[in-house]
Image: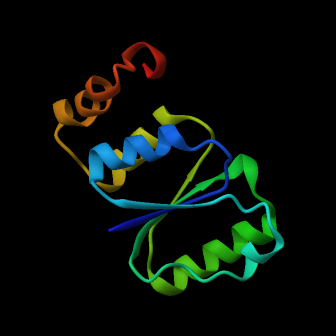
Amino acid sequence: MTVLIVGGDYVASFKQLIATQHNARIEHWSGRAKGFNKRQLPHETQLIIVICDFINHNFANSIKDQANRNGIPLVYCHRSVNELKRKLKDIYPTDKDSCCNSFCEQRNLTRKYH
């Protein structure tokens, strides 16, 4: 499974959350360069996370169109890891206990993200 994160400059917390919960390969496109509008999605992409605060409308529309053509779910998120957690629970239901504990225990970030 490949998860594509689009937008954002500092996505380490998003990558950590996805890696601990879904054991997925993560690719990040910042969207800052001109060529990103013409890029094609990786073939094995099964989820796209769009960080809305950091990309322009043309790039967001390009990603949305490609995702719709390929049947890939999109998650729109702002800079909040908690918002991403909540939205991922709706798409990929998990055990209540394992969802948060694996993330917080691994890096001891309980106070920072809760």
Q: Quadrant of residue 105?
A: top left
Q: Position of residue 109 (x, y in %)?
A: 39, 20
Q: Position of residue 14 (x, y in %)?
A: 48, 43
Identified at 80% across, 66% down, the residue is 33
Residue 12 versus residue 82 in the image, above or below:
below
User: Which coloring applies here?
Assistant: rainbow
Q: Position of residue 80 (x, y in %)?
A: 56, 35
- Judged from this view, the residue extending furthest toward the bottom is 69
Image quadrant holding the C terminus, namely top left
Toward the viewer: 104 or 89?
A: 104
Residue 42 versus residue 93 in the image, above or below:
below
- Judged from this view, the residue extending furthest toward the top is 111
Identified at 40% across, 41% down, the residue is 16
Say how many tags the image has: 0
Identified at 21% across, 45% down, the residue is 94
Image check: 18 left or right of 112? left
Toward the viewer: 89 or 11?
A: 11
Q: Position of residue 54 (x, y in %)?
A: 74, 50
Toward the viewer: 97 or 10?
A: 10
Image check: 89 left or right of 30? left
Image quadrant holding the N terminus, namely bottom left
Identified at 34% across, 48% down, the residue is 19
Q: Quadrant of residue 3?
A: bottom left
